[in-house]
Amino acid sequence: MISKKWIACVIVAGFLSVILIDQLLSQPAPPQGGPGQGEGRMRFDPQQMQQRMMERMKETLAATDDEWKIIEPRLTSVMTLSREVNARGMMRGFFGGGRRGGDDQRQRPGGQEDTTRVQSDVEKSTAALQAVLENESASAAEIKQVLTALRTAKEKSKQKLAKAQEELRQVLSVRQEAQMVLMGYLN
């Protein structure tokens, strides 16, 4: 039997895939011959994608501008914590560690390092566990210690997520709450 969490993950992944595909198809072609650009290659702008996703969320929730000013920061918090709790370690494991060129730096469009984004404790612990697992001479005690740190970080994030979900739920109408449940952001 498929668990509710997996169903929610599939729904959210499908929703995000549709948004990403729409984002990629609707981008204008970049200027030809610029530094770091190949011919006909489109640039991915995560901030623009985030903005479009939030606009669609506002439309889906049928939120007024005043309502959205209250909902958006709470929804952003829930979305961030949901990704942290549910997907980060899973995605890294599925796609071979998720590292770029041997390091775990975040990249901006054009290959520039993103120094503005701070890694969460879960991300740091996940990277530490990945590093320990890559070290073939790591002892079982070392692995267990880092694994325990990751589990502790995830548990703290789960608690933060539960609090953020409750704060979001408090400002939603019943219809909006139901939409958030269908999207997997609320239980």
Image (spheres, rainbow, N blue to C red):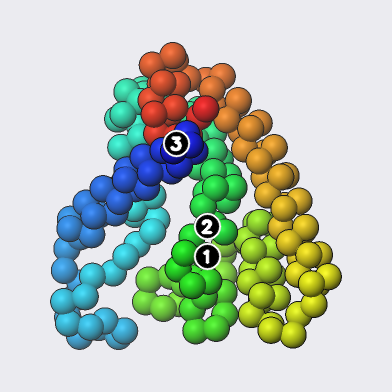
Q: Amino acid at mark 1?
A: Gly
Q: How many numbered discs, if any?
A: 3
Q: Are marks 1 and 2 in contact (CB under 8 Å)?
A: yes
Residue 32, position as x, y percentages in the image: 17, 80
**Residue named by callout 1:** 93
Picture quadrant of residue 148? bottom right
Q: Earlier in the sequence, mark 2 or mark 3?
A: 3
Any part of residue 53 in sight: no
Q: Nearer the viewer, residue 138 or 128?
A: 138
Res 60 seen here: yes
Q: CA distance from mark 2 to mark 3?
A: 20 Å
Name the residue carrying label 3: 1
Q: Is residue 91 left or right of residue 48?
A: right
Describe the element under mark 3 as helix, strand or loop. loop
Q: Position of residue 31 (x, y in %)?
A: 18, 76
Q: Which of the two labelled residues, at mark 1 and mark 3, occupies the earlier sequence position?
A: 3
Q: Which residue is mark 2?
A: 90
Which numbered disc, 2 or 3, marks the residue closer to the eye? 3
Q: Residue at x 38, y 44 (%)?
A: 10
Residue at 62% from the left image edge and 37% from the top image edge: 161
State left or right for residue 13 relative to residue 102: left
